[in-house]
Amino acid sequence: MNYRTLGRTGLKVSEIGMGCEGLIDKSFSQVKEFVDRMEALGVNCIDLYSPNPEMRSSLGRAMAGRRDKFILQSHLCSIWENGQYLRTRDIGKVKAGFEDMLRQLDTGHIDIGMIHYSDALSDWHGIVDGPVMTYAQELKEAGKIRCVGLSSHNPEVAQAAVDSGLIDVLMFSVNPCYDLQPANEDVEQLWADTAYEKELVNMDPQRQALYESCQRQGVGITVMKAFAGGELLGQNAIARVALTPFQCLHYALTRPGVASVMAGVKTVEELEQCAAYCAAPNSEKDYAAAFAAMPKISWVGHCMYCGHCAPCPQGIDVAAVTKLLNLTRAQGQVPETVREHYAALPRHAGECVACGACEGRCPFSVPIRENMKQAAQVFGL
């Protein structure tokens, strides 16, 4: 298993995390089997968006004696009422729900206190200007949560949250089809068939700017819906070209700011298949050819960080240089952290001899030589 630092939190999370879908409606022995296998595979991050009390209690029992081996991303404002899940901003219910969470999980703290599901700017303003954010910050100061997060599908809301400086972690829906769609408060538009009937060209600029802002500001991204609920896989894929789980995982993990993908697996076998991503050869992760074959969708001129430009005769990591260059473009200046990351690269854009080998291999016709020229000017190396 590979591990990444989750933004400025300092937490080391596994690239493959565990969504709680596979734990719901399972017996204690089945939940324990999941936890045993997660520990063996090195999967240490678990998202708990569901407030199902039986699931939480089973997970708490299964983690007994090894709680410190796992990073729990559990959701504030997600409560259990009348036998079903409910999202609420009622602060009394939020507080009671959090105490229930601690009791059911048999723990004294949550690693990531994720404010649950905000897709409307009006809702975000209600969170940040009301008692929910105040409560989250109080929990952080008291050590009951280690960091504050927000889950969203809307890049406009997510950007506002990142820019506020109040969240440390963003849980966001990241996959190559959703990334084509503009901001919308109606989440169902992300998977509507009509959204993919028109010509789509390149990633939505707000989404790209969001990922770059997260990396620049140290807000770690945990990914949901990497497979679009399975709609990127199989014969009925919404992009009309089926992707493999490894391709979906690799796409998400190559976006700026991303630390871990919460895989919504239903079985231990599916968890093992996702964990196998880390040891898979690059040929099984490569998504470029599949993307290029998608009808009505084009990424021409847009670097997808797919790595097809390699190897550079000069040893330049072209994808890494381009990612750092894009961060400076989004900021309009060179942040010190970006300059340091660039300086740490073993080879720099100034060493490019403009041979064009990279451009000949790029599936998306990116003007790489021009990018290298600009990077050398921007960074002075």
Image (cartoon, helix red, strand yellow):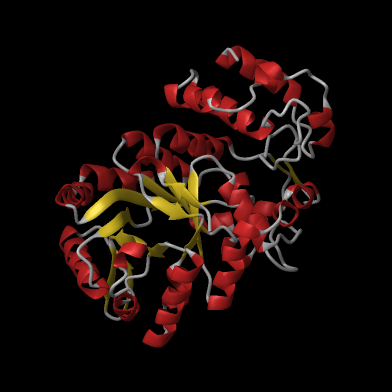
Q: Is residue 308 visible?
A: yes
Q: Residue at x 75, y 21 (%)?
A: 369
Q: Give the camera-side residue of 70 and 161.
A: 70
User: Where residue 159 sits in the image (x, y, percent)?
Assistant: 42, 38
Q: Residue at x 79, y 19 (%)?
A: 354
Count of all numbered marks drawn on residues in the image = 0
Q: Residue at x 71, y 55 (%)?
A: 281
User: Where residue 273 sits in the image (x, y, percent)?
Assistant: 61, 69
Q: Give the camera-side residue of 340 and 369.
A: 340
Up/down of 376 relative to 320, above or below: above
Left/right of residue 99 with respect to residue 195 in the rendered view: left
Q: Give the camera-side residue of 45 and 163.
A: 45
Q: Residue at x 33, y 73 (%)?
A: 63
Q: Is residue 27 visible?
A: no
Left/right of residue 124 with respect to residue 158 in the rendered view: left
User: Where residue 117 sits in the image (x, y, percent)?
Assistant: 38, 56
| Image quarter hosting the C terminus | top right
User: Where residue 148 sits in the image (x, y, percent)?
Assistant: 29, 49
Q: Give the camera-side residue of 43 and 84.
A: 43
